[in-house]
Amino acid sequence: MRVRREIVQAVFWVLALVALEASAQDVRSWLDRMNRAVEELNYEGTFVHVIGRNNAEMLRIVHRNHDGEVGERIRSLNGIGPEIVRHLDRVQCILPDRQVVLLERTRDASPLVSRLPSYSEELEANYHLASYQKGQVAHRPTQVIGIKPRDTFRYGYVLWLDQDSAMPLKSQVRDENGEVVEQILFTEFEIFDEIPESAVASTIDTEGYTWFRPPVRSRESAGEVAWRATLLPQGFELAVATQSPIAGSQYPVEHLVYTDGLATVSVFIADPLTKAEVEEGFFRLGSTNAYSLTLRGRKVTAIGGVPRQTVQAIATSIEAQ
Amino acid sequence: MTDRFQEQISGFVDDELSADECEFFVRRLQRDSESRRQLMRYHLIGAALRGELTHSHPDTLRRRLEGALSGVRETPSPPRMRAYVKPALGVAVAAVVAAVAVLALQVVNTSAPGDVDAPDAVLAGERTEPAAYVVPPDTTGRRLVSPPIQLTNYLMRHSEYASHLSRTSVHSNVVATGQPDITEDDADVTP
């Protein structure tokens, strides 16, 4: 009798473990689908972007994928504000208040970089993945996905993914106490077979604006950066190390990218000749935290969608190799 | 939006303002277009968060607001009796909101095509002066203020290596919030 009970218990735990693994695998599959949907579909939508409890803006996004050529425009519906326009390998950030356009090249599609983010089994060492009940956003059925960090060095996420397309119609970034740090909620969302190119063009007349773009003389060079973070939260690994030009500066900036497979932290190490504009200390833009300090005459700035202690820990541990 | 004005809007929506406060609130809306715009925005965002705008196309919303507006036009002018002041003011504010929203949505639905290529304007990367970052002064009195150029640069570069979800978040923050919060260096946590 006792043997039978032990067998039943063993079978129960095996089934429970199998169910958990299936659930985690299911979540990873949803995340992969979401990643593809966000980039590959043609869609338009209006969403509310909420930071904390009081700060909210309505934004409009148009995303176009025409035979693999991606274009995107994000702008505020609240008067004249910054606008971000992506077209092929260029990203423009138009700042009307400064009458400035920042022009950036999109990242290299190298095999290393294209692994970001990677929703592999390794993710589960740092996050607990779970799928919850089905929900509804913008009158579309959604699957709710929860990603809970296992320590305080990363944020958690709750995602409402469109059942059909896996597009994130609602997403919440949550801190260690479960408080919503940032939220995106689509109030209107539509997928199209085709979107005209004009729909992702800038709506701001930039005549007379100053354009900042990287000098073209130097190329991005991987693996030549002599700086590394020496103290990293568990799970974070170096994914990219480049020395490249950056818009508005004639000196290159060294750029390190650390990721745990979901969260990403960039570390920028400015050239000593660069007149640093970023002040030392913490900065926060929604769920994006930044920490800047001077190390051996170089201004080091860490930025990421992680808690402030994470950017500070990484930035302060930067050392020359 | 100032905290005080936000409190007034919130108080009005929640029916917590006194009759005097209501009158003051409406007078402010009548003379200040910026306040009307902020009220419209507050109204739209609140409706969105409550799910009331769910599945609404701007045209649908516009028609709905136009309907409300046409109904308001037939409303008699507010009587002098104090007990009726508040509902009448509510109608007036609703009319203002509807009118501004209709105009705003017309703007929203109109997008002028542009060109993503840089014009033959000054290209800072080709400048010869050693100063790495030339920060133009704010030339307008517009409300949205963008972050420092260098920080915006870093944010944009970082977003290229972040997940798509994070990229949308970073871009939304640049577009929506503008000015970053600068906080005290009071944390010293190591992993």
Image (cartoon, rainbow, N blue to C red):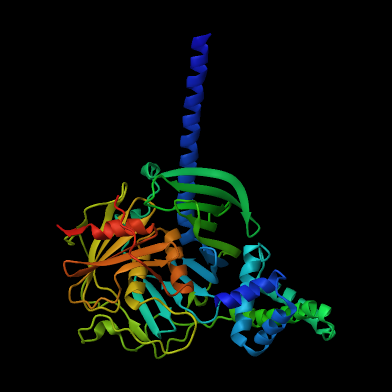
Instruction: Decide: is A55 above or below A82.
Output: above
Q: Nearer the viewer, residue A181 or A201?
A: A181
Residue at 30 percent across and 73 percent down: it is A279
For the image shown, how many numbered marks are present on the structure? 0
Q: Is residue A254 left or right of residue A14?
A: left
Is any atom of residue A67 visible in this view?
no
Q: Does residue A74 sit above or below B99 in this rendering?
A: above
User: Which one is in front, A222 or B77?
Assistant: B77
Does residue A307 lie above or below A62 as drawn?
above
Farthest residue, direction top: A1
Examine the image and state in which quarter residue A307 appears.
bottom left
User: Split into 4 quadrants, where in the image is the C terminus of chain A?
Assistant: bottom left
- Quadrant of res A229: bottom left
Q: Residue at x 66, y 62 (%)?
A: B51
- Residue depicted at 59% across the width and 52% down the height: A142
Q: Is residue A116 left or right of residue A17?
A: left
Residue under the point 38% across and 63% down: A289
The x and y percentages for residue A136 are 63, 54
Q: Residue A4 in the image: x percent, y percent?
A: 52, 12
Can residue A242 be spotted in the picture? yes
| Residue located farthest toward the left when viewing the structure as drawn | A321
Q: Indicate the position of residue B123 as horizontal and vertical percent values.
A: 30, 85
Q: Nearer the viewer, residue B114 or A118?
A: A118
In-front residue for pair B34/A260: B34
Where residue A138 appears, as percent x and y from the top left, is 63, 60
